[in-house]
Amino acid sequence: MSFFTDSFFSALTLMRDLDPELVTIVGVSLKVSFSSTLLAAGLGIPLGFAVGIKDFAGKRGVVTLLNTLLALPTVVIALFVYSFISRRGILGALDLLYTPQAIIIGQFLLILPVVATFTLSAISRIDARYRRTAMTLGATRFQTALVILREARFGIMAAVVAAFGRVISEIGISMMLGGNARGFTRTMTTAMALEYDKGEFVLAVALGMVLMSISLFINVILNVIQGKGNA
Amino acid sequence: MLYTARNLRKIYGERTVLRIDELHLEEGIIYGLLGPNGSGKSTLLSLLGFLETPSAGTLWYRDKMINNDPKILLSLRREVVLVDQHPILFSTSVFNNVEYGLRVRGIAREARQRIVEESLDLVGMRAFMHEKRHQLSGGETQRLAIARALACAPRVLLFDEPTASVDVENQIGIENIIHTVHQEKKVSIILCTHDMLQTSRLAQETIFLFDGRRSASTHENIFSASIEEHAGQPWAHLAGDISIPLNTALRGPVKMAIAPNAIRIMAEQKDMADQGTLPGKIMQLTQEGTHIRILVDVGIPLSVRIKKQSFQDAGICIGDAIRVQCPPHGIQILGEDQAQRVPR
């Protein structure tokens, strides 16, 4: 027990003093996670919206595929991306392996189905009368789409938050594609794994607390926004 | 002519829900669209509101033939607004809801403010301008939906059962609004309802629909029945042990309507069971001008309409046990697809 409390209080000291290594690791984690989430949101929201709103042949197949991709393990994605960006891969010349960009690509592929599926689900739950009402009030197709997006905004925000939570806490992609290079591609989760291997728990506990704090902060913000929206 | 329709069909899957051979609606009139549930009223309103396209047939709006060009449909939708039976409000303030139609039309902010206030005034809801949608009752939601439609300054307003889900006070309020809008704004109105009294109060012309088709009159007392022969006489079996005699060569399952005006009411007397009458109890009495509508429970609800004088002569009141007779001439077979015709 004393081991945990010692690590806990030492971790608090690291956080209070803004330990440079801790700050760097958190910075890299946030940078890659925000970037991949932003990219996935940029593509996943329109994709989920389009699949949710349109009726087309093979729609059930697309939905099944997206749902299946939700269960894709991070190491499989990492291997897949590795095969493209390693020196022998077709994108090897771009020298992306063991860079933050490689992590971003891997994480983007990891959460694209998350954002798309959750968006699709949010759009599907929207009452069909919104579309009809916007149309009868004279909205164009684009304006009608905006109404539906607006009504589904909390579900879509939840999709983005879930996706961010997935990437900030993943380790397989960051380790295999980032390489855990100190100050460059070392993220919170890869650093925690390394510190654990070394038997150094103080930094690992501090990073764990930061990770949980970030998650808590984002969820609190989401709850506040949802609360205001419902008020 | 506001609308002209010819051979209009709407088909969902393999089911034809609307088949209007001919329809002419003039501008500046309140039309009542009457019919039971499933008669195609809402489908027709969707077509007239350009929210759906016909599966077949031709529709003209103000003498222009309608095609499926999205730009043309958009411009038409900006002239015709539909107020739903259960309107849904956008999850924002009352003001933003009413303003929506103006914003999508690119109306300037100052004009929007003025029009929203005027529209809310018209439905008596200006005090609610900054309320959120979930703070409104059902009647207020319906009135707000009307204000939202009015703000768009439509040439035609389509109402899909506007008072179906509101209390009596709001019903009167909404009817007054519809009347005022028609009088002051000269808006053409098509009002779909199954309330005949409401139609008689508001509409100048009435269109009857039944089973997706135009009908000469509204059908009431519609039942699914099975026609069977007993002692050489065909009987329509309605439910349980409720059967009535009729003249028809049809046998088997049919859909039939019993005209309320044709039904006779008699005081309960002994030995009447064999005369093709049904025992019942008076549940409700309503005055309709020179007639009285009587709701009789004969095991199933039966609507009867008799002259006021006949009602007074009969000396009946609510709760009285009576007998009703449905003469064969008052029975109309509506759907006979599954029935078989036998030689007379």
Image: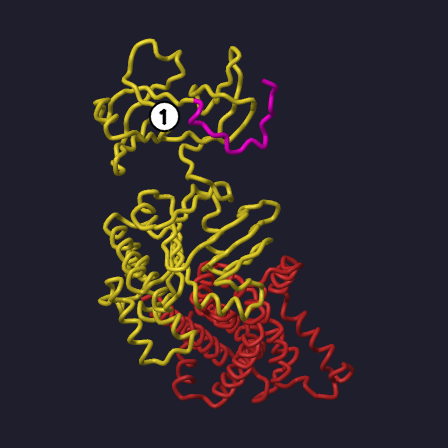
Chain colours: A red, B yellow
Label 1, secondary structure: give it. loop
**Viewer-side residue, A86 vs A109:** A109
Asked whether residue A156 appears in the rendered view, the answer is: no
Q: Is residue B114 above or below residue B300?
A: below
Q: In the image shown, does A57 or B1 lie closer to the viewer?
A: B1
In the rendered image, residue B223, in percent from the top left (x then y), is placed at: 45, 31
How many residues crowd around disc 1 within 10 Å: few (fewer than 14), some, or many (20 or more)? many
User: For mark 1, what is the residue?
Assistant: B263
Question: Measured from the top left, where is residue B208 in percent x and y?
Answer: 43, 44
Q: Quadrant of the C terminus of chain A?
A: bottom left
Residue placed furthest toward the right:
A88
The part of the chain drawn in magenta is B328-344
Q: Position of residue A156 (x, y in %)?
A: 48, 69
How far from the left and from the top, in percent, is residue B78? 44, 68
Q: Is residue B16 above or below residue B286?
A: below
In which quadrant of the rendered view does residue B291 lie?
Answer: top left
